[in-house]
Image (cartoon, helix red, strand yellow):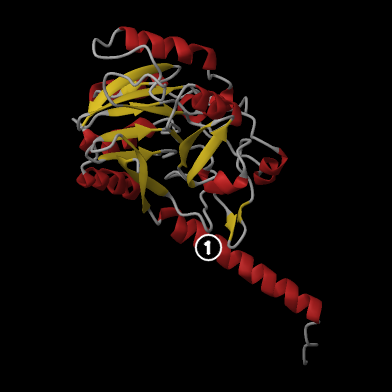
Amino acid sequence: MTRAPLSPAARIALAIGAAGAAAFAWGSLVERTRWTLRRVDVPVLPAGAPPVKVLHLSDLHMAPWQHDKQEWVRSLAELEPDLVVDTGDNLGHERGIEGIRRAFDAFRGVPGVFVNGSNDYLGPTLKNPFMYFGGPSELSRRSKRLDIGALHAYFAELGWHDLDNTAASLDLRGTHFEIFGVDDPHKGYDRLDLIAAAIDDLRAEDPLGDEHWPDAASAPRRPTVTVGVAHAPYQRVLNSFVNHGAQLILAGHTHGGQVCVPGYGALVTNCDIPRRQVRGLSTWQHGLRSAYLNVSAGLGTSIYAPVRFACPPEATLLTLVPTQ
């Protein structure tokens, strides 16, 4: 018995289904583990200063069995960064700290700073992916508490500074850095009201510091670069950072959209940042001030949504160079 030929509509539906299956296979089996190092130069250093290499890591969502990801992150130590900036969501499983230790032990002795993401507090849960089109995701009551205390203790072993709603200073290759950050804005844990006081306290304890902002008309006694760090790049946070003198802002959280459309870009941002700035280096302007903004697409995904499309996982090596 001869089968009737498929109608044009059926052929189209079959082709769309096949393309969708192929895209899902690519995103879950190939692109999700196509670790990428993005390199950018950022002109924020004072004239004549030697370059400073900053390794920006974010959104590892680590599970203990993800050995390939752990080894790739370990290999980044060969870049010999001057500073590691971790913008949160390190944990993706109750035993995620095991994988974080294997990945980060290679960075012992390298200065570092970090802030929390929501998934450093709470484990992942199964969600409807279409909910992201309705706005930033809400945290599930079914989420399990993760051992953020163990994560902080490990980072303290590495000698890294906790920047959650506070500030720290570092001297890197002859340039003085003031770095401030906030706890996770996605959970509403950011305390922007504490930043000015934290910076004032930092400068009061600095015998070589100055009471003026780095870009004030009266120049500080030594060249200073001011950096803001947050997990989620909500506009209220970025605006506040710029108001507080940040010349460079580092953030993550967005996963670059995670599933993107070639030629169009991210479909969602999971916060209120414009889609065009969901990933990569751009400029954030507020009032008469502006800062360079680097949003990392991150290195992981939820274990319940293990797919990326047109948005490979990444770390960023920012080479800070003198301004023109």
Q: With 4 as the anchor, is 99 left or right in this view? A: left
Instruction: List x then y, in percent, for residue 252.
Output: 48, 37
- Residue 107 sits in quarter: top left
Residue 231 visible in image: yes
Helix, strand or loop at disc 1?
helix
Residue 323 position in % (x across, y down): 34, 40
Location of residue 4 with respect to 305 vertically, above or below: below
Q: From the viewer's perspective, is 24 left or right of 104?
A: right
Q: Nearer the viewer, residue 16 or 288?
A: 288
Place of residue 5 in the rendered image (x, y in percent of width and height, measured from the top left): 78, 87
Which residue lies at the image location 32% right of the left edge and 40% below the top edge? 55
Label 1: which residue? 25
Q: Is residue 60 left or right of residue 21?
A: left
Question: Which residue is at a point 46% across and 54% down the rendered structure image?
Answer: 312
Q: Amino acid at mark 1?
A: Ala
How many other residues sit within 10 Å of disc 1, few (<14), some (14-19) or many (≥20)?
some
| Depicted 161 relative to depicted 94: above or below | above
Residue toward you, 157 or 159? 159
The quarter in which the C terminus is drawn is: top left
Residue 207 to residue 120: above or below: above
Visible in this render: residue 303? Answer: no
Q: In this rendering, is residue 276 above or below 167? A: below
